Image (spheres, helix red, strand yellow):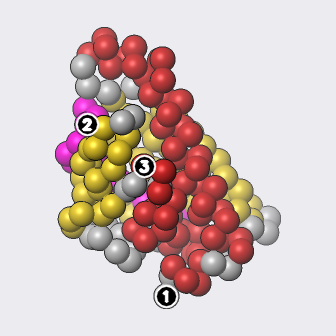
Amino acid sequence: MPRICLKTAITAPLDVVFDLSRSIDLHIISTEQTQEKAVSGKTSGLIGLNDTVTWRAKHLGFTQHLTSKITDYNRPSFFADEMIKGAFKKFRHEHHFEVVGNQTLMTDIFEYESPWGILGKLADFIFLENYLRSFLAQRNKVIKEFAESGEWKNILK
């Protein structure tokens, strides 16, 4: 099962970074390239333990729906979401937060299993893992920009 690990150092308070990471509204902003929209479940505000959200987005040229649920939650250091319905066979996305000096270190651990057996493994190798890594890195870039610039105040009201 592929595992993507990204670390992002953000010069902002831990609680701000934590809340931006679970903001439906910021997720929509950070994924404009895939036109993601929350279409059911929690569709705005901050997602929390046992909340679900269904996303509609265009990935790799196809409109897809994916429903995930917050399955673990320990404010302000950790939460995890898992797919309960969607294109993957399964996935789990862990979000870890810790203070390091004057920064918050945000660590994403994204583990997934593609459908379609050996064809899915081939897709992982050829393009899917890189696509997902780039998608997550872009999202983290937006979280960092909002947290460090003070724009977070427009999201976390």
| Residue 9 part of the magenta-drawn span | no
Q: Which mark is residue 157?
A: 1
Whichever of callouts 2 and 3 sits on the residue coming sooner in the sequence is 3
**Mark 3: secondary structure:** helix
**Mark 1: secondary structure:** loop
| Circle 2 residue | 87
Residue 43 at what x, y percent from top left? 29, 70
Which portion, as a residue range, is magenta?
Answer: 76-90
Q: Which image quadrant for residue 118? A: top left
Q: Is residue 150 above or below residue 135?
A: below
**Mark 2: secondary structure:** loop
Q: How many marks are shown on the rendered structure?
A: 3
Which mark lies nearer to you, 2 or 3?
A: 3
Q: Is residue 15 above or below residue 139?
A: below
- In the image, taking residue 69 as reference, residue 99 lies left or right, namely right
User: How far is the residue under mark 3 from the one under mark 1?
Assistant: 25 Å
Residue 155 at what x, y percent from top left? 51, 79
Q: Residue at x 65, y 71 (%)?
A: 147
Task: Point out the residue furthest to the right here.
Answer: 101
Residue type highlighted by circle 3: Thr
Which mark lies nearer to you, 3 or 1?
A: 3
- In the image, taking residue 41 as reference, residue 78 lies left or right, namely right
User: How far is the residue under mark 1 from the one under mark 2?
Assistant: 33 Å
Residue type highlighted by circle 2: Ala
Q: Main secondary structure of the magenta part?
A: strand
| Circle 3 residue | 34
Residue 30 at what x, y percent from top left? 51, 59
Q: Is residue 151 above or below residue 84?
A: below
Q: Is residue 95 visible?
A: no
